[in-house]
Image: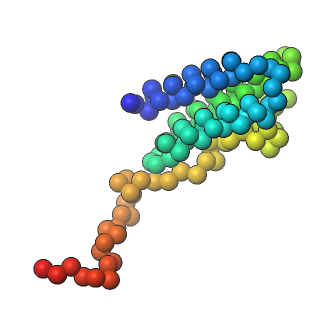
């Protein structure tokens, strides 16, 4: 499945999760559930260079959580001034995918070395 399709699927998952949760639950409970989805997706795609994909998903999740908080607190506007990224991360604990540690696969690494080449037991021919 292509990366674009996976991103679209993740966005739909986040949308469904946030639309079905009632406004009376605590924001921390909502963020916990969103973080589970984001962390699972990020761990699946942590190999390689997916910086732009992580950024798109990060922006979408933050926008949707802000929308949910505005609905809960009955606020007007976009919610960016009331709930900046730093507040969502610090106060509610929302996962920041832009800072999520990524690992590079060995297949794409230029510094690949054979793990068996430094074996203390030389191969006999």
How many marks do you count on the picture?
A: 0
Question: Which residue is at a point 63% across and 38% down the rendered structure image?
Answer: 36
Q: Quadrant of residue 18?
A: top right
Which quadrant holds the N terminus? top left
**Nearer to me, 3 or 12:** 12
**Nearer to me, 39 or 90:** 39
Is 1 above or below relative to 115?
above
Q: Position of residue 125 (x, y in %)?
A: 12, 80
Q: Is residue 15 left or right of residue 77?
A: left
Is 51 above or below relative to 14?
below
Is 51 above or below relative to 33?
below
Q: Is residue 87 left or right of residue 42?
A: right
Question: Which residue is at a point 46% across and 54% down the rendered structure image?
Answer: 104
Q: Position of residue 113 (x, y in %)?
A: 34, 67
Q: Position of residue 99 (x, y in %)?
A: 64, 48
The answer to whether any part of residue 86 appears in the image is: no
Q: Is residue 58 left or right of residue 112?
A: right
Q: Is residue 47 left or right of residue 83?
A: left
The answer to whether any part of residue 124 appears in the image is: yes
Q: Position of residue 85 (x, y in %)?
A: 75, 37
Q: Quadrant of residue 73?
A: top right
Q: How is the image coloured?
A: rainbow
Is 69 above or below relative to 113?
above
Question: Which residue is at a point 53% across and 45% down the rendered structure image?
Answer: 43
Among all residues in the image, which is located at the extreme left?
125
């Amino acid at each position: 499945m292509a990366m674009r399709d996976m991103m679209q699927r993740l966005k739909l998952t986040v949308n469904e999760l946030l639309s079905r949760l009632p406004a009376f639950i605590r924001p921390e409970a909502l963020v916990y559930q969103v973080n589970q989805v984001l962390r699972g997706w990020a761990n699946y795609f942590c190999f390689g260079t997916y910086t732009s994909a992580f950024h798109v998903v990060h922006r979408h999740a933050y926008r949707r959580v802000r929308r949910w908080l505005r609905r809960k607190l009955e606020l007007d506007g976009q919610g960016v001034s009331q709930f900046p990224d730093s507040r969502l991360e610090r106060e509610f604990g929302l996962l920041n995918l832009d800072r999520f540690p990524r690992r590079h696969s060995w297949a794409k690494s230029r510094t690949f070395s054979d793990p068996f080449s430094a074996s203390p037991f030389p191969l006999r021919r």
